[in-house]
Image (cartoon, helix red, strand yellow):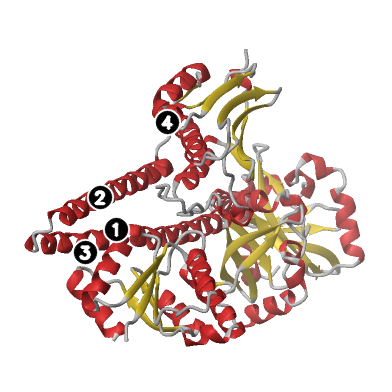
């Protein structure tokens, strides 16, 4: 060979080997010697197979002959992972380019070999980084085919990565948007810029089960030569959406609460101011009787206000505090109730009784349940039927395998049917007979029951009312 | 000519305040009170059936149990269309502690309410307010 070419061959920064039709190494350059750790004397005349992994050695000569039947300059083994073997038998990943050469009337293959160990390591690191990302990371090529997904994507969408790589991205797009999506990708790829997807819209992804998941998607183009890839970062925002809804409903609750509270607090205050003025007028007119009456009125109004403020405080506490759970002693509770409501019971000749038939203990928050039952019993006593000969209130407790049931039953006035839907509403009072009440009682009870994880319902007619409480029994509390 | 006034409010102590203030403004005026919309309608029906004189002015509170001010206005509106006698009753004033704009709008939209007044504090202002309206 010409010495200039020999120089070029020898000094090429790429390992180069010249192989003849019989797979014998004709020439090896310096780089090839360094790469494979042989001297050129050791290589020349040897079968190229010695540089190839053992598994492939047998079929390699066949590949060489096959190449010569249609010799084209090309990359070897596209789509496969190729390895070379050094003198010390260690394997390393390579990229091999092959070119046909005719010289001195003979056919040769010129192969250039590149050690891609570093590149593979870098790719591996990239994959690890993507996999470790806290957001879902997904990469598609310009045709919209998924090339790479990370663990979070697998978790969000319920697919294994093998099920996604190679598939079109539309697999994860809700049915409503499948049609226009490819066009969307095309226009993005034509003018790619890092940005959030679908600003101002609600975006959803489709889980393997078909369920739609609210997501936020960020798009990042990756330009590699003339190829465009798109990396999308995907975040599952279900939790955030749920929290937003919670905040909205809490805000509504607070608004309603403020509106009603301000009225219920302002009214008596206005009246008190008026009365105070009249007391002054009465005194200046020497009308002590009227002054005295008005002073009593002021007193009872302030008491009413006080009760309302207390109820409001209890209500806010009802929302916040959680107690330790313990077994509820119904017998002790009943004794306390008889004492607590002794005056009302005797005054109105109301009979109170109980039937405790439950076989399982109830593990619950003592104070909360006490408040609930106190409130229900107090209501039953308050709204007793004056025309009823034998007014009563009953507290009954039963259980079955799964649940514990508490019934608070009375034969009082009942709740008018048209008010049934508002029973647990804020500030709702239905009776006008002068019975004092803030209207918050049943609303608080509902809140308490929610916190206790129990259900409450009722039945009411002019013959009487029964409230039904239900608790699911804790397995561990049994026996 | 003596005037008569109907106050509709659930707070009976406040009704005492209104009654006293009304008497102070116009000693001859007849003062009637009702604790909620339902009772008020019953009173009005009673007068109508007996062909008696109906109050010249009605003051209605917005928030009351059993039947609130707005419900009362709606029902009364329908009744007015049925009975000639009732057509003389105006004006109606909504007297309430609610400073809520939407309540004000709601009241004025129903159409029967001539004025929406937020309850004044203290007798001086109460008497002034009543004087302005009753006379």
Instruction: State the residue position of label 3.
Output: A274
Q: Circles 3 and 4: CB distance less than 8 Å?
A: no
Q: CA distance from mark 1 to mark 4?
A: 28 Å
Q: Residue at x 75, y 71 (%)?
A: A176
Q: Answer yes or no: are tags 4 and 2 on the same subunit.
A: yes
The label nearer to you, 3 versus 4, is 4
Instruction: State the residue position of label 1.
Output: A268
Local packing at callout 1 (Cα closer than 10 Å; few below 14, some 14-19, many 20+) is: many
Q: Circles 4 and 2: CB distance less than 8 Å?
A: no
Which element carries disc 4, helix, strand or loop? helix
Instruction: State the residue position of label 4.
Output: A347
| Image x and y of residue A354, in percent | 57, 22
Q: Residue at x 13, y 58 (%)?
A: A287
Q: Answer yes or no: are tags 2 and 1 on the same subunit.
A: yes
Q: Nearer the viewer, residue A316 or A330?
A: A330
- Is residue B78 visible from the viewing direction of this image? yes
Using the image, tell me which numbered label, if any, was put on residue B78: none
Mark 3 / mark 1, whichever is N-terminal: 1
Mark 3 / mark 4, whichever is N-terminal: 3
Q: Quadrant of residue A294?
A: bottom left
Mark 3 / mark 2, whichever is N-terminal: 3
Residue A455 horizontal side relative to residue A447, left or right: right
Q: Answer yes or no: are tags 1 and 4 on the same subunit.
A: yes
Instruction: State the residue position of label 2.
Output: A302
Mark 2 / mark 1, whichever is N-terminal: 1
Chain of the residue where label 1 is placed in the rendered structure: A
Mark 1 / mark 4, whichever is N-terminal: 1
| Image x and y of residue A4, in percent | 62, 71
């Amino acid at each position: 060979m010409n010495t200039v070419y020999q120089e070029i061959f020898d000094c090429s920064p790429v390992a180069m080997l010249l192989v003849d039709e019989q797979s014998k190494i004709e020439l090896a350059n310096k780089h090839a010697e360094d790469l494979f750790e042989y001297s050129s004397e050791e290589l020349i005349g040897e079968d190229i197979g010695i540089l190839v992994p053992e598994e492939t050695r047998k079929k390699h000569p066949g590949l060489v002959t096959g190449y010569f039947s249609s010799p084209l300059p090309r990359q070897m083994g596209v789509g496969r992972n190729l390895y070379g073997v050094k003198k010390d038998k260690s394997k390393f990943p390579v990229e091999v380019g092959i070119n046909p050469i005719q010289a001195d009337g003979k056919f040769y293959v010129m192969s250039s070999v590149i050690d891609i160990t570093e590149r593979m390591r870098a790719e591996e690191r990239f994959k690890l980084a993507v996999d470790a990302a806290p957001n879902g990371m997904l990469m598609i090529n310009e045709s919209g085919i998924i090339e790479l997904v990370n663990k979070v994507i697998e978790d969000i969408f319920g697919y294994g990565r093998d099920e996604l790589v190679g598939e079109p991205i539309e697999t994860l797009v809700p049915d409503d948007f499948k049609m226009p999506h490819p066009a969307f990708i095309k226009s993005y790829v034509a003018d790619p810029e890092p940005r959030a997807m679908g600003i101002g819209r609600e975006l959803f992804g489709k889980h393997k089960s078909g369920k739609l998941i609210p997501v936020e998607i960020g798009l990042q183009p990756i330009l590699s030569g003339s190829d465009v890839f798109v990396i999308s970062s995907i975040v599952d925002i279900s939790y955030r959406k749920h929290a937003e809804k919670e905040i909205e409903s809490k805000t509504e609750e607070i608004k309603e609460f403020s509106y009603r509270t301000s009225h219920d607090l302002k009214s008596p205050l206005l009246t008190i101011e008026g009365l105070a003025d009249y007391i002054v007028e009465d005194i200046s007119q020497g009308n002590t009787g009227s002054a005295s009456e008005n002073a009593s009125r002021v007193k009872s109004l302030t008491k009413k206000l006080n009760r309302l403020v207390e109820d409001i405080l209890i209500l806010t506490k009802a929302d916040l505090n959680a107690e330790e759970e313990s077994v509820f002693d119904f017998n002790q509770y009943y004794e306390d109730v008889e004492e607590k409501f002794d005056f009302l019971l005797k005054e109105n000749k109301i009979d109170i009784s109980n039937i405790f038939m439950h076989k399982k203990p109830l593990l619950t928050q003592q104070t909360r349940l006490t408040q609930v039952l106190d409130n229900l019993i107090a209501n039953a006593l308050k709204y007793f039927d004056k025309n009823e000969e034998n007014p009563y209130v009953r507290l009954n407790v039963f259980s079955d395998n799964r649940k514990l049931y508490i019934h608070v039953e009375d034969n009082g006035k009942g709740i008018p049917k048209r008010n049934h839907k508002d029973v647990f509403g804020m500030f709702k009072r239905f009776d006008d007979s002068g019975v004092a009440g803030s209207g918050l009682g049943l609303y608080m009870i509902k809140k308490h029951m929610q916190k206790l994880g129990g259900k409450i319902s009722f039945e009411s007619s002019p013959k009487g009312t029964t409230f039904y409480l239900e608790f699911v029994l804790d397995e561990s509390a049994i026996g | 000519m003596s005037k008569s006034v109907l106050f509709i409010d659930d707070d009976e102590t406040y009704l005492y305040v209104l009654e006293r203030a009304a008497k102070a403004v116009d000693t001859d005026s007849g003062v009637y009170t009702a604790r909620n919309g339902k009772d008020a309608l019953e009173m009005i029906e009673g007068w109508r059936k007996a062909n008696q004189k109906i109050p010249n002015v009605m003051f209605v509170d917005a928030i009351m149990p059993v039947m609130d001010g707005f419900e009362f206005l709606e029902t009364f509106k329908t009744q007015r269309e049925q009975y000639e006698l009732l057509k003389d009753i105006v004006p109606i004033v909504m007297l309430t502690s609610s400073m809520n704009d939407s309540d004000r709008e709601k009241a004025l939209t129903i159409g029967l309410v001539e004025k929406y007044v937020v309850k004044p504090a203290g007798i001086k202002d109460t008497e002034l307010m009543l004087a302005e309206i009753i006379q």
